Image (spheres, rainbow, N blue to C red):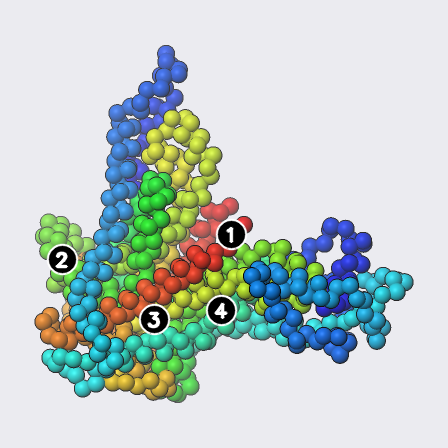
Amino acid sequence: MTSSSTGVASGNGLSGSADTPLSFRKPSGSRTLKNGLATAYAVVATILALIPLVWVLWTVVSKGARLVLTSSWWLESQRGLTPRREGGGAYHAIVGTLEIGLVCAVVAVPLGVLGAIFLVEYARGTKSARAVSFTVDILSGIPSIVAALFVYALVITILGLGRSAIAVSLALVLLMLPVVLRSTEEMLKLVPDSLREASYALGVPKWKTVLRVVMPTAFGGISTGVMLGLARVMGETAPLLILVSYAMGINFSPTSSTMGSLPTMINAGRDVAPGLPGYDRTWAAALTLIIIVMLLNLVARGISRATKLKEK
Amino acid sequence: MRRGEERIVTDTTRQPGTVEPVVDPLAHARTGVEAGARSDFPRPLEDDPLTDTPAGADPAISPVQDEAARHSPVPVVEHHPAPSQPSTDRPGSGVRLATISRTGDRVFGAMTKGTAILLVLLVAFVGIFLLVLALPSILADKDSFLLSRSWQVSGGDLRFGILGLLWTTVLSSLVALVIAVPVAVGVALSLTQYLPKRVAGPVGFLVELLAAVPSIIFGLWGLTVFGPFLGPIGAWIGHALGFIPLFTLVSDPKSTVFVAGIVLAIMILPIITSISKNVFEQTPRDQIEAALALGATRWEVIRTSVLPYGRSGVISASMLGLGRALGETIAVLIILSQPAPGSRFTPSIFAGGETFASKIANNASEFDTPSKTGAYIAAGLVLFVVTFLVNAAARVVAERGVK
């Protein structure tokens, strides 16, 4: 895995030589060398891993900050603009991204939470729990493009409806559901059984125990999962490419076949030559998307830190 | 509600300490099922006593205690005789217990169960729908679906196969894996074994932040910044090792499988790192200390206890990363140059190409006839099956490791 092939013979040094059974001498030269190399390797790998993050963030911020800091960026759309013309903003795309994400969350969160309650509170350790858990594993491995194709097959080919922003939200539900479900499940498992027992002992019905005792205790962790799921879903592009067309103007009707969104706005502007105003707008859209997604991530982490349940 | 309290009290004499309330605690209260005795409550459930929490109290616990204090001492004389399961009623106790309504439990239980069934159906439907819509096109395919490299789907004459797509998909993901796994293991080791906690926390956070960057942004960055940076390096390798077919320089070095693979490596790095880190953290403390006591250097500790312990975890993490890389769409679509139609196939990593996902996404606007759409759905189906197999393998490895 790592450079593990290098060290085979170093075991000799461990026992010490026969005539000095209790010598506390330093490890032999080759062992020290290998140890040093391994340390250097770990440090270099860590630095290598951090370079892309810094590089991507720096690129996006340096190219996009100028426009993002103007107020018109947040208040205007791209209607009627060509890459050669200055002005306009990302209002249409920001609202589109938020809207698609929210519609998705409205469907995915209840399903995910109820599924997790089933797994932990009703079917823990049973065969049906294992079956459901298995399907959730499959679901979490589905590539976004396959989720999009499924919704295309269902909504457009079989039901005969057109492309729409709602269809995108449905495809995203498939991607958000496993995230919400798994994190909720983890949190519910951490709720101490003594709380449930106390509630049951007082005669509180099970459903009320779940809703009023277990859920509030796990609320922080669950909302963290929701935020992380939203962050993942809002950055997705593939379903948007297949299931809705990019609109440069403001169109917030979820049933319409065109809607702006930040990922498709970036995609539409990806080939604009550097120096043109459209190029700056593409990077500004990228920065806006990063800001939204990172904000969701940071809030999620904040919540999870503030309301952390102790591991058992 | 009332009934449950009383029942616990009376029951304790009979089953001292042997009850397992978590498994099915309501078994105690189950006797009074559905007597429709809501009206018996001096204070109906709808009043929601649970919400009257004293300020500053722990919201999770105190409402229950609160209610207990309010209700507990008064036994209620029941209007109905206890309907069923007399075995739990103490004969001759003289105390009749109020019944509780189980409607809420029924409804809520059914809702969670229904959701679970819906989930299973959903996943089944994903497979079934894709298969149903892909089959006609696969059957009408005049080329071998699995072995052909051509992709001709417009018009009535269907000639398409997935071999070219499969090659590019697997090749780019393998490039990603070969680069990401050693780096991820190194990072996970330094997070768990080398860095002091004060530093490891923030560094781990930054690496996980990498997972939050949307893939379209990696695509844009790869196209405009990273590709041009990596291009000359790729061209140099291509010139030096070009005699090996895998490294022949074919197309513009800025947008090759090589570049796409490295960007994919960056995208799957956080997944592999965080799972490996979690496994390494769980290395038994006594194994590490035993190795240290024998005089092992830090690297020897890692080699003899941490790596063997975490091996299955790292493999399973790599498989999960591979699954993610196989299905990645937009970054690959943006970075890879598409070969001109009819151009000769090359196995090189310094060539453009199309993966399953990028092919589908790139041609989404052409889904006009069912047979054409079916061909793309067939490609999606293959991708679904491949990622499923990879993910399943990851789970198997992980579970075997736990034992």
Q: Disc 4 designates what residue? A: A112
Mark 3 element type: helix
Residue occupying image coordinates x 70% and y 60%: A201
The amino acid type, in three-letter code, at marker 1 is: Lys
Q: Position of residue B345 (x, y in %)?
A: 19, 64
Question: In the structure shown, which secondary structural element does the residue marked by tag 1 occupy?
Answer: loop
**What chain does badge 2 belong to?**
B
Q: Amino acid at mark 2?
A: Phe
Residue at the top extreme of this rendering: A19
Crowdedness near tag 3: few (<14), some (14–19) or many (≥20) residues, C-alpha within 10 Å: many
Name the chain letter of the residue that bears numbered label 3: A
Q: Which residue is mark 1?
A: A310
Q: CA distance from mark 1 to mark 3?
A: 30 Å
Determine whether the residue tagged by mark 2 lies in a helix, strand or loop: helix
Callout in the foreground (4, 1): 1
Mark 3 in CB contact with mark 2 (< 8 angstroms):
no
Sequence-first tag of 4 and 3: 4
The residue at 31%/22% (across/down) is A26
**Residue tagged 2:** B229
> CA gap, disc 4 to disc 1?
23 Å
Labels 3, 2: front one: 3
B253 or B100, which lies in front? B100
Crowding near pointer 1: few (<14 within 10 Å), some, many (20+)?
A: few
Which residue position is annotated with label 3?
A234
Image coords of residue A13 (percent x, y): 34, 23
Residue at the spot x=29%, y=63% of the render? B213
Which one is closest to the eye, mark 2 or mark 1? Answer: 1
Same-subunit check for callouts 4 and 3: yes
